[in-house]
């Protein structure tokens, strides 16, 4: 088995991995390798033919494929090496990766720094424990998107969608445009998990019904889905008796959320956040293992690709600082823990450096419910470090709040981010 050495190994060649590699290269890192498991760069963007990408980063209304191509062009212009069809099957705390690829077979790569950018995956039927038969026609929304956009195959004609995540909402619109009928979108929660614009543009504009507090309780059919039974749920999300109804369909699409792909992170012994499913990081996006950074959807699931690219670029710049010795290892005494308080389901990063490369840090968070004219505060005990009022907070949309670095004095022991209604 051969051993290769690089300054920076980027695991994943989607928007996060490409943006991180470009920023690191522009920051002076000389030896970079992107390891991508697919045959091409781009990740999930390659199958997103709808527009709405790049409005901020490229000042253009792009499709996902166009956005991916522009990112890939940047990588190629800088001459950053890319190893495609490459699976990173192992990673140690001392930054040695085991990689298998058709080009090089099985090899070890020792990196001075690593950026984890593996993205996320969809929750499947098995993860949701949906009862009933196991016929053909039950698939995730992302799988249906790949069939339709990359392989030219329409997987169904009469569709029910379980969950109102953004991919499912976008696929509802696309199925209608392809001549299929979307019978209904059912959502377990009392609010949609997708962006408000996707509710308006993908459901309302096409008169597709959305049933909240509703879930699938049975799947019918032997060789092919023939229909599903749905029922309303109570406050504990248990089916309410006598609310069952049958919906005829030949396809059940599951759009019930995304899970960060953190198997490698666990293998390296890096602690994960139970609320985000991603690594615990500081405001430089470094994990609790020195020299290993995490960014993009593997860190916490984003709603906009522009935010993924911005965060990944920050990780790339910080990796460059680390490799040049300008980002020293942060001791536990120099870190301020951050926790999610009342009304906040998740916050990233979970640790803040008292001294860092910028004069402020940005906390990303999600609310647990829909709120209007809500105030979010970051407190150190009874002291308010920062506060901001939001016209609308919805769980499907990530929000940010800025914390002045100067506020993280020696007296700051812990910051709690809370919602005040």
Image: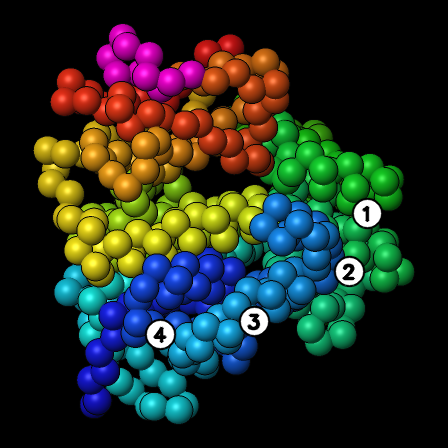
- Report the Cα–Cα distance between label 4 and label 1: 46 Å
Residue 272: where, in percent of width, then height? 29, 47
Residue 130 shows in this picture: no
Q: Is residue 95 above or below residue 273?
A: below
Residue position for label 4: 33
Q: Earlier in the sequence, mark 2 or mark 4?
A: 4
Q: Is residue 122 left or right of residue 5?
A: right
- Report the Cα–Cα distance between label 2 and label 1: 10 Å
Q: Residue furthest right?
A: 179
Prevailing secondary structure of the magenta residues: strand
- Report the Cα–Cα distance between label 3 and label 4: 16 Å
Mark sitting on residue 183: 1
Q: Is residue 378 left or right of residue 243?
A: left
Residue 384 in magenta?
A: yes
Please state which of the two labelled residues, at mark 2 or mark 1, is closer to the viewer.
Answer: 1
Q: Earlier in the sequence, mark 3 or mark 1?
A: 3
**Residue at 25% from the left image edge and 70% from the top image edge:** 7
- Report the Cα–Cα distance between label 2 and label 4: 44 Å
- Report the Cα–Cα distance between label 2 and label 3: 41 Å
Mark 3 Cα shell of 10 Å, populated few (<14), some (14-19), many (≥20):
some
Q: What kind of element bears circle 2?
A: loop
- Report the Cα–Cα distance between label 3 and label 1: 41 Å
Residue 178: where, in percent of width, then height? 85, 62
Mark 2 Cα shell of 10 Å, populated few (<14), some (14-19), many (≥20):
many
Q: Nearer the viewer, residue 130 or 315?
A: 315
Residue position for label 2: 250
Q: Earlier in the sequence, mark 3 or mark 4?
A: 4
Mark 4 Cα shell of 10 Å, populated few (<14), some (14-19), many (≥20):
many
């Amino acid at each position: 088995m051969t051993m290769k050495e690089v300054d920076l190994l980027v695991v994943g060649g989607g928007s996060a991995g490409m943006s991180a590699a470009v920023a690191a290269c522009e920051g002076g890192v000389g030896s970079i390798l992107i390891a991508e498991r697919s045959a091409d760069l781009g990740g999930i963007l390659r199958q997103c033919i709808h527009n709405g990408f790049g409005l901020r980063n490229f000042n253009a209304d792009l499709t996902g494929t166009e956005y991916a191509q522009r990112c890939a062009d940047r990588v190629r212009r800088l001459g950053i090496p890319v190893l495609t069809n490459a699976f990173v099957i192992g990673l140690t705390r001392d930054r040695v990766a085991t990689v298998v690829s058709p080009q090089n077979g099985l090899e070890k790569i020792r990196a001075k720094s690593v950026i984890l950018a593996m993205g996320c995956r969809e929750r499947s039927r098995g993860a949701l424990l949906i009862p009933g038969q196991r016929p053909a026609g039950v698939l995730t929304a992302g799988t249906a998107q790949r069939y339709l956009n990359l392989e030219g195959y329409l997987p169904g004609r009469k569709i029910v969608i379980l969950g109102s995540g953004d991919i499912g909402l976008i696929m509802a619109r696309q199925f209608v445009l392809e001549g299929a009928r979307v019978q209904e979108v059912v959502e377990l929660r009392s609010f949609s998990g997708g962006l408000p614009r996707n509710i308006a543009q993908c459901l309302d504009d096409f008169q597709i019904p959305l049933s909240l507090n509703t879930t699938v309780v049975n799947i019918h059919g032997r060789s092919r889905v023939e229909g599903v039974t749905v029922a309303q749920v109570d406050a504990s999300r248990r089916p309410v008796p006598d609310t069952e109804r049958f919906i005829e369909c030949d396809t059940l699409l599951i759009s019930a959320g995304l899970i960060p792909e953190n198997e490698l992170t666990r293998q390296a012994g890096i602690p994960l956040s139970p609320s985000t499913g991603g690594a615990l990081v500081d405001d430089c996006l470094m994990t609790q293992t020195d020299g290993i950074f995490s960014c993009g959807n593997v860190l916490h699931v984003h709603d906009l690709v522009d935010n993924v690219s911005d965060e990944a670029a920050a990780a790339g710049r910080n990796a460059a600082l680390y490799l040049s010795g300008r980002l020293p290892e942060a001791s536990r005494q120099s870190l301020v823990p951050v926790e999610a308080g009342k009304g906040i389901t998740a916050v990233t990063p979970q640790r803040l450096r008292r001294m860092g490369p910028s004069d402020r840090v940005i906390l990303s968070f999600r609310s647990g419910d829909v709120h209007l004219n809500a105030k979010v505060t970051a407190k150190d005990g009874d002291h308010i470090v920062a506060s901001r009022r939001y016209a609308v907070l919805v769980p499907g949309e990530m929000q940010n709040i800025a914390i002045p670095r100067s506020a993280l004095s020696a007296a700051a022991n812990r910051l709690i981010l809370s919602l005040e209604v």
